[in-house]
Image: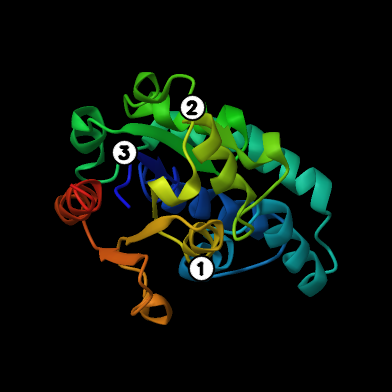
Amino acid sequence: MAIKGVIFDSDGTLVDSEPVAARLLQRLLAERGIELDHRDVLQRFRGVQFAVFVGQLCEQYAQLDAEPFMHEFRARSLDAFRAGLEPMPGAVPFVQSLALDKCVASNGPVDKIHTCLGQVGLLESFAGRIVSAYEVQAWKPAPGLIVEAARVMGLPPAECVLVDDSHAGVEAGLAAGSQVIGYGTEDFSPYLGRANFHRAEDYPRVAQVVAKLAAAAN
């Protein structure tokens, strides 16, 4: 079945926001007496529902108060994204040249998605095509967010391909019945051999896979 729509994750797939967020999280944790390596912070929260990430930290560090911590991070992160956010290499020209319908499906809140996409010049490319897990109350790795993104495009999930840089995203896409592209340098070896999983370390390879999937039934 040929794909007719492309669903994009935002953080780490369209925008290079994860290192920015991890640095801010590291600072906020240090202010509370919790010293974690930047790479450890990045690995823990990458692709995970933020409340789950904070809840796990609270279980480990009794001095951490979840609600004030999350509120401060949300308030300060938008300024951090506006100050130093870049698109993922090749993402902007690929999205802007894409002939297929497209949508963003992110675990992040709407204001974060809009801020990040606006900062890198991609907000207009997804007008009316942005789905936040906070709106549908379904976070990756559950499939509901991907199912809703497909619905927004008027397509069944099987006619969509998800581009995502995280295990949580890949698992959500596979569970939804979509084709899935594991993007970036993450180790996606657990999914190799799955008929609807594809690997792409950069956007030139994403473009090749999308073109092949779009022509599958032609």
- Residue 107 shows in this picture: no
Q: Is the residue marked by circle 2 packed among few (<14), some (14-19), or many (20+) residues within 10 Å?
A: some
Q: Is the residue marked by circle 1 packed among few (<14), some (14-19), or many (20+) residues within 10 Å?
A: few
Q: Amino acid at mark 1?
A: Gln
Residue 130 x %, y %: 51, 30
Residue 212 in the figure: left or right of residue 83: left
Q: Residue drawn at (74%, 68%), measured in percent from left and top?
A: 56
Q: Residue drawn at (22%, 30%), measured in percent from left and top?
A: 99
Residue 86 in the figure: left or right of residue 56: left
State how far apart marks 3 and 1 are (Cα): 20 Å
Residue behind mark 2: 115
Tag 1 or tag 3, which sits nearer the N-term?
1
Residue 179 in the figure: left or right of residue 32: left
Q: Residue drawn at (32%, 46%), measured in percent from left and top?
A: 3
Say above or below: 120 vs 6.
Answer: above
Residue 38 in the figure: left or right of residue 181: right
Residue behind mark 3: 86
Tell me the element at label 1: helix
Tell me the element at label 3: loop
| CB within 8 Å, label 3 to label 1 | no
Q: Nearer the viewer, residue 180 or 81?
A: 180
Count of all numbered marks drawn on residues in the image = 3
Q: Nearer the viewer, residue 159 or 75?
A: 159
